[in-house]
Structures are given as C-alpha cells and as structure tokens.
Amino acid sequence: MQGETKNIIQEESAKRTLDVLVVGSGPAGLSAAVYAKRASMSVKVVEKMYMGTGQVAESGRVDNYLGLPGMNGYEMGEVFRSHAQEFDVPFLEGEVCRFEKSRDCDCWIVKLSNGEVQKARAIIYAAGAKHRHLGVPGEEEFGGRGVSYCAVCDGAFYRGKSVVVAGGGDTALDDALYLSELCEKVYLVHRRDKFRGAAATLEKLRQKENVEIITSAVIKEILGDKRVQSVALADGRCLAVSGIFIAVGMIPETECVKEIVALDESGYIVADETGRTNKDGFFAAGDVRTKQLRQVITAVSDGANAAISAAEYLRNK
Ligand SMILES: Cc1cc2nc3c(=O)[nH]c(=O)nc-3n(C[C@H](O)[C@H](O)[C@H](O)COP(=O)(O)OP(=O)(O)OC[C@H]3O[C@@H](n4cnc5c(N)ncnc54)[C@H](O)[C@@H]3O)c2cc1C
C-alpha cells in the first residue's frame, strides 16, 4: 500500500475510534457516559436490552436514593437515561460478546453478537449483575409484591411484619439481622444444615428472640392473593409471612470478560472505586465490580469515578 493511502486509512480509522465505549446503560453506565461527555471525550453506550436502564427498572419503589425518595424504579431509570440523552450521548442496541486489544490502533476492538464492531481507546464495563432465583412457583408472579432480592432496598416496607429470608451465605445472614430490627418475625430458611456465612453473625441471630432459624428445609412455593401471604416448605410446613427476601447469590455479567480481566472467586471484576482493572484502559463500574454495597447510589458514583479514571488514562497516553 502506498504510504499516503495507508496514512489516510489510519487517520480515518482513528477518527472512528471512540475515546470511551461504555457497556451497559444501567445507573453506572449512564453516569459514566454523562461524566465522559462532560470531560469532552467521544463516547457511546452499548446496551443489550431495548431502551434498558438496568436492574433499577425492576424496583417498584426506590426509597434510598438521596433526593428522590419513593421514586418508582422504572421512572428513575428513565430519568437517568434522559439525562444522558440531554448530553447527546449516542446509544447503540446490542450485546457485547468479545473484547480484543489491538496493537495497530492501540485500542479495544469490541465485537457485538449482531456482528457489529466498535473501536475505543478505553472501555467502561458496567454490565451489572443479576440475582440468582429460587425457581419456585410464585417467585416471578409475586416479584415486587412480596418477593424481594434486596433487604436494604425493601426492608422498610415490612416494618412490623413477618418475613422469610432464604439462603445460607453472608448476605442471607446479614439480611436476616437487618430485618430482625424492623420486622416482627424473621424466619431464616436454609436448605442445608450448616451455614456458609460468618459464624459471628449466626450467633447474633441465635440470640434474637424474633428470629427462627429453619435448616435442612426446601422452599416449595410462594403463595398469596394480590401479595405474598405464605411460604410453603417441602416438609409440609407453611409460614404465614408478608414477604420473602431471597438471598441465594448474584451472578455478575462477566462471561465475556473472564479471559481478559482479573475476577474474584465469585466472578466479579477486581477493581477499586477508581474502576481500574488489571488491564490498561479497561475500567469496571457498578454492580459488576468487587465492592461492599451494590446499590443505585454506589453504581452512579462508580460510573463517575470510572469516567474520570478513563479521562486521566487517555490524557497520560
Ligand atoms: C428488584 C430490584 C430492586 C432493587 N431495589 C433497589 C433499591 O431500592 N435501591 C437501590 O439503591 N438499589 C436497588 N437495587 C439494586 C440496583 O438496581 C443495582 O445496584 C444497580 O442497578 C446497579 O447498576 P449497574 O449499572 O451497575 O448495573 P445494572 O443495573 O445491572 O445494569 C447493567 C446493564 O448492562 C446491560 N448489559 C449486561 N451485559 C451486557 C452486554 N454484554 N452487552 C451490553 N449490555 C449489557 C444490562 O442489560 C443492564 O441494562 C435493586 C435491584 C433489583 C433487581
């Protein structure tokens, strides 16, 4: 190829290379996009769900996001997305399935499952996580009407009521302890005879008069009318409760990055609040990274931090 032609092709390619590609338009991704735009970076957001705004859309009522108490989760997601649209952030519908680092353009080549390819000098990966489900009858039907996956989010709605917490790990034990301060009665139901969660928390639960620990018990069905009214166990017992908190684990959306960035033993991307991973130019934000509290407010904060880290990375290159 003639030198001049090659240079033109390289220049054209550089023009098409974004500064930042954000994966996921949940709270973390949208916040990252707003911060990236305001830092004068060229940015695009790829989202696999049509007009998706992440898990927050599944919440009937978000009561713990500062300044917006009692907001419907779907509306909150729409508000976040329209904020990004006001800054002219372009959105692309598609599922990212592969990342490759190219030496030619010193950028990431990002492949989508529909065959499209995007190029970006930095990636902000904000693909979130999803709650593992029990898979029993009534679980989907009563979602948001007595079935919850987040005690910190929804616990306050069950003040003075009876609830079940399902699970045996740290989250289940912490949820049961948290709910025991609000609820009249908490049944902690675990399918095994031993708990995986911290022994100290379990001991605290044993001291609580309003907590009943039920081990070696399998949840068979969640029953109710308009809302949850009881939880049936496989051994025939039926617990009269207004709600069930399912804490049987989360599945981080890291399948397509597991070969390129370091993950912890639970599959989350190892990154601190700067969003930096073990790969240059690849940042993680929101529920998908290692962190203590997976909430809207921490996801939004992560997005901002990751965008500023990406800007600093590009400046120093
Ligand atoms: C039912 C429910 C109720 C909740 N209630 C509250 C509450 O009251 N208060 C609170 O603070 N938090 C609540 N949360 C938690 C909160 O919603 C999450 O912490 C927050 O949404 C995390 O934001 P995120 O952007 O990191 O990830 P997510 O919200 O999970 O967004 C990730 C996005 O990435 C997209 N994506 C994933 N993989 C790909 C891919 N390969 N390519 C393209 N796109 C991809 C997904 O479709 C999704 O839109 C609740 C969660 C649920 C499920």
Image (spheres, rainbow, N blue to C red):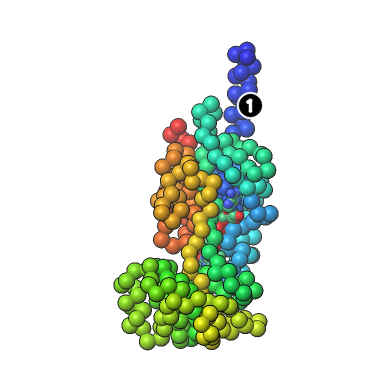
Q: Residue furthest front?
A: 235
- Residue 218 visible here: yes
Residue at 41% from the left image edge and 61% from the top image edge: 292
Q: Is residue 216 left or right of residue 146?
A: left
Nearer to the camera, 128 or 265? 265
Residue at 68% from the left image edge and 54% from the top image edge: 50
Figure quadrant of residue 196: bottom left
Q: Position of residue 227 (x, y in %)?
A: 62, 81
Nearer to the camera, 53 or 210? 210
Ligand 1 within 8 A of label 1's CB? no
Residue at 63% from the left image edge and 47% from the top image edge: 95
Q: Residue furthest top?
A: 2
Nearer to the camera, 4 or 266? 266
Q: Position of residue 284 (x, y in %)?
A: 48, 48
User: Which quadrant does the C terminus fall into?
Assistant: top left
User: Which quadrant does the N terminus fall into?
Assistant: top right
Q: Quadrant of ligand 1?
A: bottom right
Is 250 located above or below residue 279 in the figure? below
Per the image, the residue denoted by label 1 is 12
Q: Secondary structure at mark 1?
A: helix
Circle 1 Cα neighbour tier, 10 Å, few/some/many (<14 / 14–19 / ≥20): few
Q: Is residue 178 left or right of residue 135?
A: left
Residue at 62% from the left image edge and 32% from the top image edge: 16
Amino acid type assigned to the residue bearing label 1 in the image:
Glu
Is 1 located above or below residue 47 in the figure? above
- Residue 158 visible here: no
Q: Position of residue 44 (x, y in %)?
A: 61, 43
Q: Position of residue 102 (x, y in %)?
A: 53, 31
Q: Is residue 314 left or right of residue 78?
A: left
